[in-house]
Amino acid sequence: MPELPEVETIRRDLAPLIGQRLKGVIVRLSKLVRPGPGALKSLVGQDLQEISRRGKLLLLDFGERVLLVHLGLTGALVLQRGQGGPPPHTHLTLQFTRDRLFYADLRQFGWLEVVPREDLPRHRFYASLGPDALGVSYQEFSHRLRASGRRLKALLLDQKVLAGLGNIYVDESLFRAGLHPERPANTLSPEELKRLHEAIQEVLQRALELRGSSVRNYVDGRGEAGAFQEEHLVYGRRGNPCPRCGTPLAYKVVAGRGTTFCPRCQHLP
């Protein structure tokens, strides 16, 4: 699933669309659009004013209405500035004044929804999201972790607690912070909390520099792969030697997700 660095990379790639008018819409798979294709077509004739992000959610601002885009497991938004056909598994095309925007989705778990601007603060999904993982203050971060006895992996994956993290960046951050994924959050010392907060920020910033992780299907807004997967220290490397101590990396299911960690560097007290 595209996580915060991937979605933020796409947001930045789509910046040339800002100021362009939506001229037409082609919907090939209506189930992806909420409440239906007619809502999306209501945006035709409107100028795209801004593109923002909250967690893994993209928001395309058309003034009175906002188009929410969640990429699900395999969704992609690809900007086409010249000639050429759509990428594979394209289900939606937005024709702007100069450029086209394709929504492609192999497994079709993503969704797009048109929401009146005044209803956005009350939108069920949008309103449920916690603070954005990129740039969240240490004070807010530590407050949320200290208030819960849940296991770190489960807590960090919870978008209501912290928006934007997924399996890749939670595993990578916990390893860099030297914390076991099953450690209860409220047992962390101030030093450990600070270490984890810093690790999350460093991992996300570095992933952004390398335009995300292309483990399976992810491509950026230009249809190209990211490169952060080349710097993964634990994710997808179970059984390999720990890059710090050489111990074989362990793997188990935590919070319903496959989790890779070093049993020595991330020992459970």
Image (cartoon, rainbow, N blue to C red):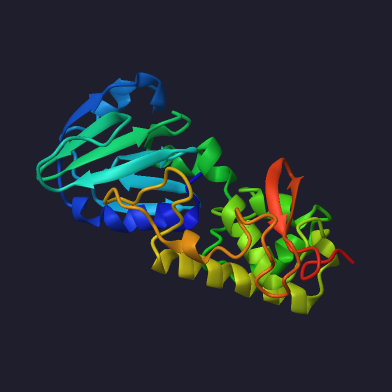
Please name the residue shown 21% across and 52% down the image.
Answer: 18
Quadrant of the rendered image containing residue 34: top left
Please name the residue shown 90% across and 67% down the image.
Answer: 269
Compared across the picture, whether 23 is left or right of 123 comes to left
| Residue 72 horizontal/vertical position (percent) | 48, 38
Please name the residue shown 77% across and 71% down the image.
Answer: 265
Compared across the picture, whether 5 is left or right of 252 comes to left
Say which of 52 and 224 sits in front.
224
Q: How many marks?
A: 0
Say which of 46 and 23 sits in front.
23
| Residue 228 horizontal/vertical position (percent) | 46, 62
| Residue 118 horizontal/vertical position (percent) | 40, 41
Quadrant of the rendered image containing residue 74: top left
Please name the residue shown 41% across and 38% down the image.
Answer: 75
Say which of 90 and 119 sits in front.
90
**For residue 128, above or below residue 35:** below
Compared across the picture, whether 268 is left or right of 50 comes to right
**Is any part of residue 130 visible from this angle?**
no
Q: Residue furthest right?
A: 269
**For residue 196, above or below residue 260:** below
| Residue 238 horizontal/vertical position (percent) | 67, 54
**Is any part of residue 147 visible from this angle?**
yes
**For residue 163, above or below residue 71:** below
Say which of 173 and 49 sits in front.
173
Quadrant of the rendered image containing residue 260: bottom right
